[in-house]
Every structure is written in structure tokens, then in C-alpha cells.
Amino acid sequence: MSSLSPRENSAEAIAPSIPTLLSLTKDNNAQLRENVFRTLGFLRPKVPPQVVAAMHESVRDPDPSARSMAILAIARAFAKGSNDEKLLKELLLDPQSLIRKTAVEAVGIAMRRKPSGSRCRQDTSTVHTIPMRA
């Protein structure tokens, strides 16, 4: 058993439920998908790879609110040097204004992440430039 509190080790605490939660990311109910990503975005200290893959897949969700929550979940699980960084930068140029706004918020969250596990930003000295739309 881990010495982390249940809140600090939420990934382990809900591990048996992760397959069910992942299946719900494909549900027809957009609000349900949004809530699943809200939950998955707060896993600590390590986000399981299958969860990260589902987050990446869901940034193309047809519902903007569910997409936004998947984007924020990626930011909360951010890993510098991973595909997360590239994906968040691409979303800054999305045609939907809600998604661009969420991507800006997500970049801010990702850049403020404190080291807490393998899927977190380790280097806080780097200055990132964000491409702006013409």
C-alpha cells in the first residue's frame, strides 16, 4: 500500500473503475463525457497511459464542452516534452473560439504544474512562445 493519502493517490484509488470511465468517454451523452474528463483530469500522482490516450482522442469530441474538459484534463496531467505540449499548441489555432480559449487556459495550467509524478512538468525555467492567429 502506498504512503500517499487517497487524494494524493487517486489513480490507485479508482484504478478498478478506470475501464468503466474510459468506456464512458464514448457515451452518447455529452454531459456525461464532460464529467468523466473532469474526473480523469484530477488523477494523481501518475495518469495511466490509457487515460492519457483517451484524453488525446477526445480533444476531437463533437461536443465543445466535452472537448474543453478533455483539453483541461490534458493540462492537469501535462508532461513536458510529451505529445501534450504539441497538442495544446495546435489547439490554440482551433476554428472554435471556445476551444481556443480553453487551450489558452490549458497552456497556463500546464506551465504552472508542479512536479508530482511522471506526467508533470519538471522544468520551470523555460519560456514558451505561443503562435498567434493572424
Image (cartoon, rainbow, N blue to C red):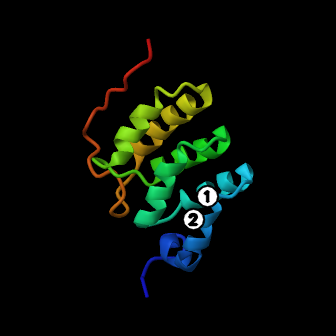
Q: Which mark is residue 4?
A: none
- Which residue corresponds to the image point at 52% horizontal and 71% vertical from the top-left? 10
Above or below, 107 against 120 in this view is above
- Which residue corresponds to the image point at 40% horizontal and 64% vertical from the top-left? 49
Check the picture and name the quadrant holding the C terminus.
top left
The location of residue 103, given as percent across then percent down, is 50, 35
Q: Is residue 125 left or right of residue 63?
A: left
Q: Which mark is residue 22?
A: 2
- Which residue corresponds to the image point at 32% horizontal and 27% vertical from the top-left? 129
- Which residue corresponds to the image point at 28% horizontal and 52% vertical from the top-left? 122
Circle 2/circle 1 CB separation < 8 Å? yes
Q: Is residue 47 in view? A: no
Residue 3: quarter of image: bottom left
Residue type at mark 2 is Leu
Single out the residue that lies furthest toward the bottom.
1
Residue type at mark 1 is Thr
Mark 1 falls on what kind of element?
Answer: loop
The location of residue 88, given as percent across then percent down, is 43, 38
Label total for image: 2
Residue 25: quarter of image: bottom right
CA–CA distance in space, label 2 to label 1: 5 Å
Q: Residues within 10 Å of mark 2 (few under 14, many from 20)?
A: some
Q: In the rendered image, which residue does mark 1 sit on?
A: 25
